[in-house]
Image (spheres, grey):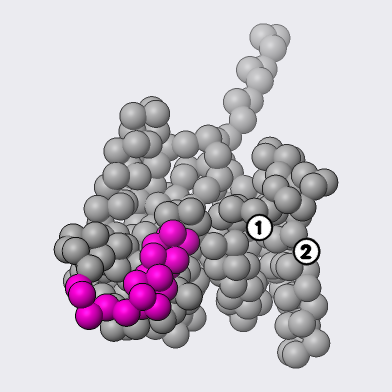
C-alpha cells in the first residue's frame, strides 16, 4: 500500500540534503553525549575519503549525490551510517578491521543505500507524514485513498528501515567489491563477528518481525551466494583482501628495551 500512497510525493535534492544534514547532526550530537567525539584528523579521514570516491564511481545515481560528506567518530565498534542527501558517518574502530576488503565493504554498503534510493524513499515517507498531519483530510479524499495513506504511515512508524533494504545494499556492495578486485569474503568474517557480538540469531522465527536488519548469519550467507553468482558470471582468481593497506593505521607495539650489558 505504500507506493500508491507515495504517488505524487517528490523530494528535491535540496530538500533531501536538508533532511539528511539534520539527521546526521542529530546522530553526531547523540554520539557526543555518549562520549564518542568527532575526529577531525587528516590521515584516517583522507583514507576513507579515497575509498568513498573510488566506490562511489560504481553508483548509477551519483549525479544526485555529487557531494558526499564524510564524518568520523571515535567509537569502539565498527560501524557505518548513511543519511539522505549524501552524508556518511563511520567509526574509528572500522579501521581496526583485519583487511581493507572489509572496510571497503562497509563503505560500499552505505553508498548502496544512497544509490538504491532507500534514503530518498525514507524522506518521501517523512514528507507524506508531514503533509498528511499538517492539515485536516480534504472532504473529496476517498476512503480508499485515506486508508492507503494511513497504512503507509503506520508502516513508516512501525518499521521505517527495512531488512530487504539491507539485503539489497549488501548485494550491491558485494558486486562493487568484486568489480574492484576486493575479496567479498571479508564481509563473511565481518558478519560472523557481528553475530558473535550481538547474538542475533534466535531459534524462533517470530522474532524476525519488526526487525530493521536481517540476522547477521543470514547476511553472511547472502554474501556467499552473491559471490558464487558473480564467479559463475565472470570468474576471476585475483581477488584480494588487501590487509597491508590498513597496516599504517595500526599502533605499533612497544619494543622491549634491551637489557643492560
- Majority secondary structure of the magenta segment? helix
Visible in this render: residue 171?
Answer: yes
The residue at the far top in this view is 260
For the residue carrying disc 1, how many other residues have a C-alpha within 10 Å: few (<14), some (14-19), or many (20+)? some
Instruction: Give, as a single range, the part of the protein colored magenta.
Output: 138-156
Q: Quadrant of the C terminus?
A: top right
Instruction: Please indicate whether residue 19 sits to the left or right of residue 169 in the image.
Output: left
Q: Along the line of sight, which residue is nearer the eye, 169 or 261?
A: 169
Q: Alpha carbon of mark 2 to alpha carbon of mark 1: how far? A: 11 Å
> Eyeballing the image, is 216 above or below 152?
above
The spot of residue 246 in percent (x, y) is 57, 52
Q: Along the line of sight, which residue is nearer the eye, 200 or 94?
A: 200
Residue 221: mark in rendering: 2
The spot of residue 62 in percent (x, y) is 37, 80
Visible in this render: residue 236?
Answer: no
Residue that appears at 78% across and 68% down? 224
Residue that appears at 63% across and 77% down? 175
Q: Which residue is mark 1?
A: 214
Kindly indicate the quadrant of the structure image that contains residue 41.
top left
For the residue carrying disc 2, how many other residues have a C-alpha within 10 Å: few (<14), some (14-19), or many (20+)? few
Amino acid at each position: 500500500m505504500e507506493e500508491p500512497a507515495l504517488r505524487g510525493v517528490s523530494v528535491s535534492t535540496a530538500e533531501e540534503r536538508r533532511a539528511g544534514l539534520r539527521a546526521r547532526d542529530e546522530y553526531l550530537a547523540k554520539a557526543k553525549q555518549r562520549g564518542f567525539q568527532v575526529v577531525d584528523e587528516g590521515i584516517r579521514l583522507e583514507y576513507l575519503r579515497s575509498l568513498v570516491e573510488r566506490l562511489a564511481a560504481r553508483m548509477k545515481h551519483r549525479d544526485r549525490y555529487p557531494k558526499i560528506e564524510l564524518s568520523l567518530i571515535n567509537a569502539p565498534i565498527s560501524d557505518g551510517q548513511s543519511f539522505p542527501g549524501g552524508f556518511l558517518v563511520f567509526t574509528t574502530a572500522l579501521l581496526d578491521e583485519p583487511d581493507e576488503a572489509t572496510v571497503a565493504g562497509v563503505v560500499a554498503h552505505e553508498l548502496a543505500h544512497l544509490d538504491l534510493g532507500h534514503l530518498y524513499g525514507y524522506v518521501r515517507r517523512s514528507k507524506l507524514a508531514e503533509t498528511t498531519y499538517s492539515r485536516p483530510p480534504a472532504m473529496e479524499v476517498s476512503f480508499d485513498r485515506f486508508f492507503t495513506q494511513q497504512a503507509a504511515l503506520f508502516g513508516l512508524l512501525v518499521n521505517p528501515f527495512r531488512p530487504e533494504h539491507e539485503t539489497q545494499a549488501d548485494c550491491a556492495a558485494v558486486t562493487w567489491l568484486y568489480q574492484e578486485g576486493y575479496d567479498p569474503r571479508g564481509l563473511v568474517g565481518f558478519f560472523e563477528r557481528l553475530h558473535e557480538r550481538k547474538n542475533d540469531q534466535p531459534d524462533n522465527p517470530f522474532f524476525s518481525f519488526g526487525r530493521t536488519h536481517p540476522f547477521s548469519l543470514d547476511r553472511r550467507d547472502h554474501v556467499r551466494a552473491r559471490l558464487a553468482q558473480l564467479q559463475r558470471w565472470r570468474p576471476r582468481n585475483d581477488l584480494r583482501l588487501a590487509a597491508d593497506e590498513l597496516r599504517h593505521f595500526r599502533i605499533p607495539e612497544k619494543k622491549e628495551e634491551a637489557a643492560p650489558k
